[in-house]
Image (cartoon, rainbow, N blue to C red):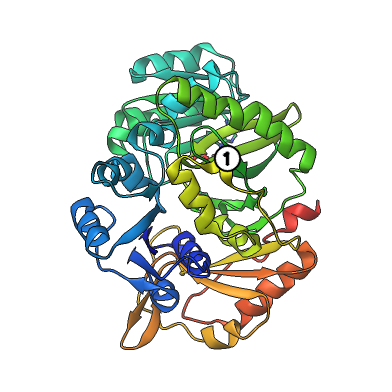
Amino acid sequence: MNVLIIGSGGREHALAWKIAQSPRVRHVFVAPGNAGTAADAENIEIPESDFVGLIRFAKETQVGLTVVGPEAPLAAGIVDAFEKEGLRIFGPNKAAAELEASKVFCKDLLRSADVPTADYHTFRDPARAVRFLQEREDVPMVVKADGLAAGKGVIVCDHREQALEAVNQIAREKVFGDAGNRVIVEERLHGQEASVLAITDGRTIVTLQPAQDHKPAYDGDTGPNTGGMGAYSPTPLVDDKTLHWIEEHVLVPTVHALKRMRRPFRGVLYAGLMITNQGPKVLEYNARFGDPECQPLVMRLKTDLVDVLDAAARGELDQIAPLEWDPRPAVCVVMASEGYPGKYAKGHPIRGLEEAAKLPDVKVFHAGTAVKDNQVVTSGGRVLGVTALGDSIPKAKLAAYTAVKKIRWDGAWCRKDISDKAMR
Ligand code: AMP
Ligand code: GLY
């Protein structure tokens, strides 16, 4: 069959690379894609927001399965639009994607399903949020905008003054627009973060191997927040016993609660967790594969991903055999543009991609890249996800950074400590 992947980042390149290996697949299209997906699949110049154009393309090209990468089209109802036309698509519909699109919806669901999460209060009126903060003792808090804010709507605060300013920014200044119509003030949790992703058809849950992201820009988890500067899998933070506990106490009750609310969730359920002294607690849910977690995960997955995604989209995930994984860990190092996550320039030619590609057990996934005058150039903040397998986490790390060293462009940088958190 033909497969259409929606999106243009490192996650979508990883999905395209993996899906293209399926013996069931004739052709992989990526809309709109990047320079990496142009090499491993075929790019289609249709933006991810143009549902009419995407549906027309899927019909004309006999696409048998569409896979949605990013959250914005899911929240806007791309799955509903495709299904209305009788087209098979992998991802949650609009009602289920609210789990990511509305943090208030997510928190209320977690509370009602008795899933461990930080204590919280939600406010429509900023004055009430301010009063709440002033009446409580001055403890570290987290202030969140309800809606999607490109990963920036969360402000972690040490003191009351910061929390008050965060409420002001989100709910009064509306720096994230309507995403700030409601605001959440929650208890600040402490611990290490881990990502546990599962594929579900709304009934059966297939849990993927645990991964860990690195969200702060600089080494030692310092600096501004980013989309993720690197990831590795598996992470020793979540051993088999903990993973089982998370399935039982987090994933299963969440999927059941959504089903009870008549919003059955089909797609990737991504739990962002804090591993606290009292056990794992949910920080947030995403309704899609993580980026960059997807890159090391697909590098390790041996099972045909198309079988799994297609079965989930059909509601037949119970027919799938247990997933097979490469036991070797994988480490993904994100190479970024100078200035990211702030302002950055685009259009720098990237050198050394061929040399890096020659290394064994290495795959360079593209994120913000484009082809210009027959050359691969930078076109985004996160540019590449250099991913490697190794017999141990330090060996996978060494292999990834050996590949990173082969690649150069003006202003290229990366964190030097991806996966070191596994060693502590
Ligand atoms: P989110 O978009 O909800 O994942 O939040 C982004 C980041 O903010 C998370 O990855 C955490 O590092 C941090 N964060 C969110 N909620 C909390 C919390 N309750 N306590 C501590 N850190 C948090
Ligand atoms: N890696 C974080 C995310 O995909 O949201």
Residue 288 vs 218, above or below: the answer is: above
The residue at which mark 1 appears reads as 318
Residue found 63% across the figure and 78% down from its top: 403
The answer to whether residue 157 is visible is no
The secondary structure type at the circle numbered 1 is helix
Please name whichever residue, 326 or 190, is drawn nearer the observer in this view of the structure: 326
Please name whichever residue, 406 or 411, is drawn nearer the observer in this view of the structure: 406
Residue 380 falls in image quadrant = bottom left
**Residue 196: % across, % down:** 62, 43
Q: Quadrant of the N terminus?
A: bottom left
Residue 313 vs 284, above or below: the answer is: below
Please name whichever residue, 129 or 327, is drawn nearer the observer in this view of the structure: 327
Please name whichever residue, 8 or 146, is drawn nearer the observer in this view of the structure: 8
**Residue 424: % across, % down:** 81, 51
**Residue 161: % across, % down:** 49, 27
Q: Amino acid at mark 1?
A: Asp
Does label 1 point to a residue whose CB lies under 8 Å from ligand 2?
Answer: no
**Residue 423: % across, % down:** 80, 55
Mark 1 is surrounded, within 10 Å at the Cα level, by few (under 14), some (14 to 19) or many (20 or more) other residues, namely some
Residue found 49% across the figure and 86% down from its top: 351
Residue 191 vs 311, above or below: the answer is: above
Residue found 79% across the figure and 68% down from its top: 391
Q: Left of 124 or right of it: where is 415?
A: right
The answer to whether residue 121 is visible is yes
Residue found 66% across the figure and 34% down from its top: 247
Query: Farthest residue in the top direction?
Result: 135
Q: Left of 50 or right of it: where is 29?
A: right
Query: Farthest residue in the front direction?
Result: 319
